[in-house]
Image (cartoon, rainbow, N blue to C red):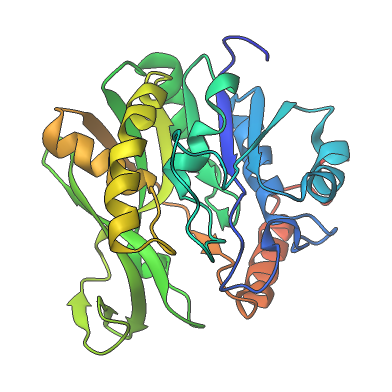
């Protein structure tokens, strides 16, 4: 491990169930770049010196897709999220295949992180501003019991091809996060968005200007101890309620810490447009957007040339 370097942690262990494949290594850029390469490129430009990829089984394919292309530009490390990484005595429920969630994934990298770090999803395009905001925070303000959330506008994060999951944020006058509520089924409804808690039987309106979490965080390294201590009790409750689908989610855990432990999250809004690849049908529009950004000069043709 390279000590004391500000790291970018990329959550790339998801199964891509709605997408239908390992979308993290699907080429979308003009020269065959994969989506997370743009995040790493923007992170390097902002000042990050190290990236930790949290993956599952496909390390060889994942490393071949990104390692040779990036390794001369930034330090690279890997951590593996395992379904078997559970507290002593806990048995994996029969039929369980889904990973244990984003907070559990982050724990897989706890031995790799000894300095402040940011966390992002592998299958999101965040834009350069988010990485500048995060790096400035991590180098100047990161401290225990505090964090940064780079938030986006709900209407700019919806997919025309199906429902999405978003953390709906309530932000106070001092840019502090008050609450974050995970809505796992949200659809675009024109002037409004709508969420459902009963698999689409009923729908409740959401303002499309609502701030949302896209899982772009900045943390002091002490957050890992909080996540570690919280996993066993969360797992115990989750296995009782929904053993096949329960997830230990980072937004939910941070929201609970804000409410019960005096944890403070500073929110900073990114004005860049967010793009994602939740469904296969999202790929063409994403590729067109990246090609346009390249033509405009935001990215070179061939990121690592």
Q: Quadrant of residue 75?
A: top right
Q: Quadrant of residue 46?
A: top right
The one of 230 and 164 positioned closer to us in this rendering: 230
The one of 139 and 186 positioned closer to us in this rendering: 186
Query: Relative to residue 302, is residue 145 depicted above or below?
Result: above
Residue that sits furthest to the top in the current view: 3
Q: Residue at x 77, y 50 (%)?
A: 58
Residue that sits furthest to the bottom in the current view: 201
Q: Residue at x 45, y 31 (%)?
A: 134
Question: Picture coordinates of residue 226 (x, y %)?
Answer: 32, 26
> Is there any visible trace of residue 175 in the rendered image?
no
Question: Picture coordinates of residue 177 (x, y %)?
Answer: 20, 41
The one of 82 and 118 positioned closer to us in this rendering: 82
Query: Relative to residue 160, is residue 141 depicted above or below?
Result: above
Quadrant including the C terminus: top right
Answer with left or right where residue 126 lies relative to residue 76.
Answer: left
> Is there any visible trace of residue 116 in the rendered image?
yes
Q: Residue at x 57, y 20 (%)?
A: 111
Answer with left or right where residue 176 lies relative to residue 238.
Answer: left
Query: Relative to residue 188, is residue 142 depicted above or below?
Result: above
Q: Residue at x 48, y 39 (%)?
A: 86
Q: How many marks?
A: 0
Quadrant including the N terminus: top right
């Amino acid at each position: 491990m390279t000590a004391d370097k500000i790291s970018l942690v990329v959550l790339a262990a998801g199964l891509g169930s709605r997408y239908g494949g390992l979308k993290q290594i699907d080429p979308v850029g003009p020269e065959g770049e994969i989506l997370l390469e743009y995040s790493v490129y923007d992170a390097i430009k902002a000042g990050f010196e190290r990236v930790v990829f949290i993956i599952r089984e496909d390390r060889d394919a994942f490393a071949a897709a990104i390692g040779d292309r990036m390794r001369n530009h930034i330090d690279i490390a890997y951590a593996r999220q395992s379904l078997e990484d559970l507290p002593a005595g806990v048995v994996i429920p029969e039929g369980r295949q889904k990973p244990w969630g984003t907070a559990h994934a982050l724990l897989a990298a706890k031995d790799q992180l000894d300095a402040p770090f940011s966390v992002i999803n592998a299958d999101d395009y965040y834009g350069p501003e988010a990485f500048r905001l995060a790096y400035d925070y991590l180098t100047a303000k990161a401290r225990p019991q505090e964090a940064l959330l780079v938030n986006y506008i709900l209407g700019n994060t919806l997919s025309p091809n199906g429902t999405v999951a978003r953390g709906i944020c309530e932000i106070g006058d001092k840019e502090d996060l008050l609450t974050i509520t995970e809505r796992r089924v949200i659809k675009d409804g024109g002037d409004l968005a709508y969420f459902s808690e009963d698999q689409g039987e009923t729908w409740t309106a959401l303002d499309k200007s609502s701030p949302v979490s896209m899982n772009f965080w900045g943390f002091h390294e002490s957050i890992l101890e909080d996540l570690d201590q919280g996993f066993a009790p969360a797992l115990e409750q989750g296995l009782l309620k929904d053993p096949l689908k329960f997830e230990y989610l980072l937004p939910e855990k941070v929201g609970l810490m804000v409410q019960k432990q005096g944890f403070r999250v500073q929110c900073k809004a990114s004005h860049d447009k967010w793009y994602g690849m939740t469904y296969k049908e999202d790929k063409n529009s994403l590729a067109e957007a990246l090609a346009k950004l390249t033509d405009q000069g935001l990215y070179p043709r061939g990121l690592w040339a």
